[in-house]
Image (spheres, rainbow, N blue to C red):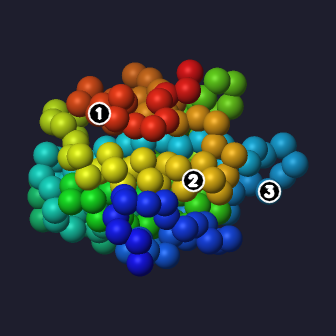
Amino acid sequence: MQTQGSQLYEINAHGVVACAQQVTSPNQDDRPSDVDSPVIDMVVIHNISLPPKQYGGHGIIELFTNQLNPNEHPYYADIYTAEVSSHFLIRRDGALIQFVPCTKRAWHAGVSKWKSRERCNDFAVGIELEGCDFESFEAVQYKVLNALLQSLKNTYPIQYVVGHSDIAPGRKTDPGPFFDWDRVIEKPSH
């Protein structure tokens, strides 16, 4: 097994990173197969913490697997029915969790547009960083993110690495002002 972030991750033909912890999210489906649908050429970076500004718990996994208890935290009452997911989550300690194979469509971008293309879930891989808009991310998260981005670029024709705020401006703010794009091997492609 590869050390987290120290080298590239092997992505198999099904879009699975074997050394990542696998937690299957039901919030996925097939990518469009019509002739006009694009290939996987974008990565969208997000941030998430559940409860907000708290780290290390099971809230994110429970949200992405539709098991969030609305009585566990007041914030959960508004989001527990949301059917959302992401391909990957990078925890504060650098642990990598995969919820959806890259070949499938994870439900992470919502209403979104990049250049003239709408529905970014159709052609993007979503990566969540455990964090929030109000504090810095950990060095190990950037290390794992960079290794994962390079592996994705080696596997798919990735042209764009953007934040959720880039594809849903005014609606989303993540990865937020404390995300340091200068620490990322792939800067936003505008």
Residue at 13 percent of width and 46 percent of height: 53
Q: Report which residue position mark 2 lands on.
A: 152
* Alpha-carbon span between mark 1 and mark 3: 34 Å
Q: Which residue is mark 1?
A: 179
Quadrant containing the N terminus is bottom left
- Badge 3 density bin: few <14, some 14–19, many ≥20, Cα 10 Å: few
Question: Residue 7 at what x, y percent from top left?
Answer: 44, 60
Task: Check whether the beta carbons of the residues at disc 1 and disc 3 lie within 8 A of each other.
Answer: no
Reply above or below: 59 against 152.
Answer: below
Is disc 2 placed on a helix, strand or loop?
helix
Circle 1: residue type:
Phe
Mark earlier in primary sequence (2, 1):
2
Residue at 29% in and 65% down? 95
Q: Is residue 138 visible?
A: yes
- Give the crowd class for mark 2: few <14, some 14-19, many >=20 residues within 10 Å: many
Q: Callout 2, which amino acid?
A: Leu
Mark 2 vs mark 1, CA separation in Å: 20 Å
Secondary structure beneath label 3: loop
Element under label 1?
loop
Q: Are marks 2 and 3 in contact (CB under 8 Å)?
A: no
Q: Nearer the viewer, mark 1 or mark 3?
A: 1
In the image, 69: left or right of 83?
left
Query: Residue 124: where, in percent of width, then height?
Result: 59, 46
Q: CA distance from mark 2 to mark 3?
A: 20 Å
